[in-house]
Image (tube, rainbow, N blue to C red):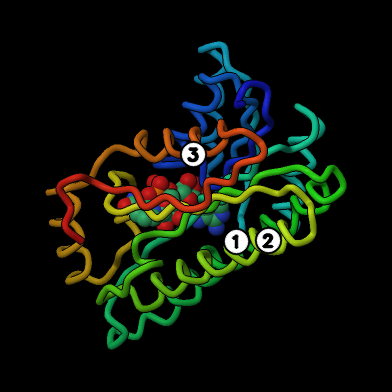
């Protein structure tokens, strides 16, 4: 069931996060949006409210543990205990290893890996105390297969896959009733390619996305499906992409 669930969404200022916030709110969830661009969050939340939904936002840098704790507190104070956290914030600065974009490697590790760990660490105490909760994370098809240009980005997404699977196993072993779901999207039309600074990688990705990319609403509907499943069911992994995309 989705109605009245309190759902935190990281990276909710654009793309998949924004689409998911809008869809879940329209289905009766109480959504709490986090990202760094406050102007975007404010506008999206105002729009959701104008359409009759329940929403709040807080600026959030997922690399900062305190920010993650703060958004959980805001959600609890505004709507009550958190039911779901959607760990969606991420960057994709793809480039060949030989380009040695080491600053971007470190940013990707900080946001895509540590951001996920920080989000889980912030929400776990309430999930454990209530023996209930759902963690949904966005990996990528680059978290399942190796792609040239994605040595570091793909590595961060392989991490998400491992972390989420172990979380699922341990939650079952510990009897905490925490459900997990991990998404492996292919080309989705969002602002993600804007973070690619390597000209060759930008051109190749640009062509691929121009040809194939589908709307972020397609991913939002999968998140909604995972949340809506009965509490005794974990639908754990979703690989989702354009019908036309071969790889
Ligand atoms: P967008 O660039 O549109 O969205 C990324 C979101 O992450 C933005 O809201 C951005 O907000 C947020 N974000 C980035 N850094 C931080 C940070 N340090 N703290 C908090 N929020 C942050 O791209 P997508 O919607 O496509 O990306 C969402 C997820 O989907 C990512 O994890 C991405 O890797 C994954 N993905 C996307 C695919 C695609 O084809 N689009 C394919 C596979 C996976 P702000 O800048 O305001 O902080």
Element on which disc 3 rests: helix
Q: Quadrant of the N terminus?
A: top right
For label 2, the crowd category at 10 Å Cα-Cα, with few meaning under 14, some 14 to 19 and many 20 or more, is many
Indicate the secondary structure of the residue bearing disc 1.
helix
Mark pair 3, 1: CA separation = 19 Å
Residue 95 location, x and y as percent?
29, 75
Q: Residue at x 31, y 55 (%)?
A: 194
Residue located beneath label 2 in the image: 118
Q: Position of residue 91 (x, y in %)?
A: 43, 60
Q: Which residue is mark 3?
A: 223
Ligand 1 closer than 8 Å to the CB at disc 1? Answer: yes
Q: Is there a contact, CB below 8 Å, between mark 1 and mark 2?
A: yes
Q: Which quarter of the image is occupied by the C terminus?
A: bottom left
Q: Which mark is residue 165?
A: none
Q: Give the alpha-carbon distance from disc 1 to disc 2, as whole Å.
A: 5 Å
Lower sequence index among marks 3 and 1? 1
Rendering coords of residue 51 (x, y %)? 51, 12
Q: Is residue 218 left or right of residue 90?
A: left
């Amino acid at each position: 069931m989705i109605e009245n669930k309190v759902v935190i969404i990281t990276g909710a200022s654009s793309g998949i996060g924004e689409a998911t916030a809008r869809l879940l709110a329209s289905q009766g969830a109480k959504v709490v949006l986090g990202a760094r661009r406050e102007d975007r969050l404010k506008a999206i939340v105002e729009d959701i409210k104008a359409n009759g939904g329940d929403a709040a936002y807080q600026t959030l840098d997922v690399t900062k543990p305190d920010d993650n704790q703060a958004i959980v507190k805001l959600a609890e104070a505004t709507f009550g205990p958190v039911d779901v956290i959607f760990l969606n914030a991420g960057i994709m600065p793809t480039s060949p290893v030989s380009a040695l974009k080491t600053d971007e490697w470190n940013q990707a590790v900080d946001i895509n890996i540590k951001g996920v760990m920080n989000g889980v660490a912030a929400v776990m105490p309430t999930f454990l105390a209530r023996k209930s909760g759902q963690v949904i994370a966005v990996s990528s098809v680059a978290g399942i297969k190796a792609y040239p240009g994605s040595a570091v980005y793909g590595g961060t997404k392989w991490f998400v896959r491992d972390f989420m699977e172990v979380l699922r196993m341990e939650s079952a072993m510990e009897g905490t009733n925490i459900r997990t779901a991990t998404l492996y999207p292919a080309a989705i039309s969002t602002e993600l390619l804007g973070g690619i600074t390597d000209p060759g990688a930008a051109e190749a990705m640009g062509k691929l996305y121009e040809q194939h990319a589908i709307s972020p609403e397609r991913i939002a509907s999968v998140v909604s499906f995972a949340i809506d499943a009965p509490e005794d069911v974990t639908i754990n992994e979703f690989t989702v992409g354009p019908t036309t995309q071969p790889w």
